[in-house]
Image (cartoon, rainbow, N blue to C red):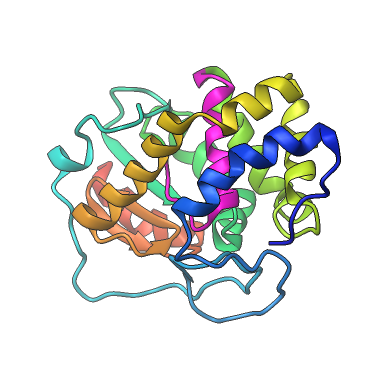
Amino acid sequence: MKPVASHVSFACLWAGLSAILAAFLILTPAMAQTAATPTPTPAAPAQPVANAPVPTPSTPTMAPIDQLMAPAALPDVVQGAPDAPVTIVEYGSTTCTHCAAFHDNVFPTLKTKYIDPGKVKFIFREFPLDPLATGSFMLARCAGPDKRNAIIDQLFTQQKNWAFVDKPIEALLDLVKQSGMSQVDFETCLKNQELMDQVSQTRDRAAEKFNVDTTPTFFVNGRKMTGDLPIAEFDKVLEPLLK
């Protein structure tokens, strides 16, 4: 990731982001690359890559639902009916192109078909692949629970306009300003060490307890599914659960 221009208005912001950069020193973000791979995005630097192939495991991997739904560092922001019979948990990164493809191309159908009618509740959880994703998740949380999911949707829809540009911090500021966030709030949020730690803890818990190492990763009533899956793959799993 190229450094942000050092003019005065972003001096404080860059100081705040330095903590994020240090915390993720082992990850070397490659925001401007355009490499393509045929596999799901690994838990490594974000790169614009081709859509991942649909995995077809013979035996599904299950996560204990009580552990999956246990309270954690950050509260879940649920979409759909709280008492829906099926729960989908997604771990994703805002700089993951496969995640963006899912949210742009598949999630609208999933929402119309299953979430809106009260059949499924959907929970998106933070699994940042790089410092920029961490910062974007922090900003979505700082906007408040009523705006958090809408901002994440916008981050995915506009991903190429902020995540893979020469000055991503400035582009990110322009994007969240649309939700009413001021530059002062933007800079204050990115200097919130407690929130940064909570985002990191969410990611670490997913990796350690549920073996999440790929984005997007989904758990459908505990059943693990990975990759930029088409709606047909969700249909195969959801329909038997809803009978």
**Within the image, what quadrant is residue 202 found in?**
top left
In the image, 118 versus 140, the foreground residue is 140
- The extreme right residue here reads 7
In the image, 165 versus 40, the foreground residue is 165
> Percent position (x, y) of residue 45?
54, 67
Residue 111 covered by magenta stretch: no
Task: Tell me, yes or no, if residue 114 can be seen here.
Answer: yes
Q: What is the span of residues highlighted in magenta in the rendered image? A: 124-145
> Percent position (x, y) of residue 122?
40, 37
> Percent position (x, y) of residue 95?
60, 55
Query: In the figure, 81 relative to 19: above or below?
Result: above
In the image, 36 versus 141, the foreground residue is 141
Q: Residue at x 79, y 42 (%)?
A: 170
Task: Tell me, yes or no, if residue 124 can be seen here.
Answer: no
Q: Which residue is drawn at 26% across and 48% down?
A: 205
Q: Residue at x 79, y 52 (%)?
A: 167
Tell me: 67 left or right of 122: left
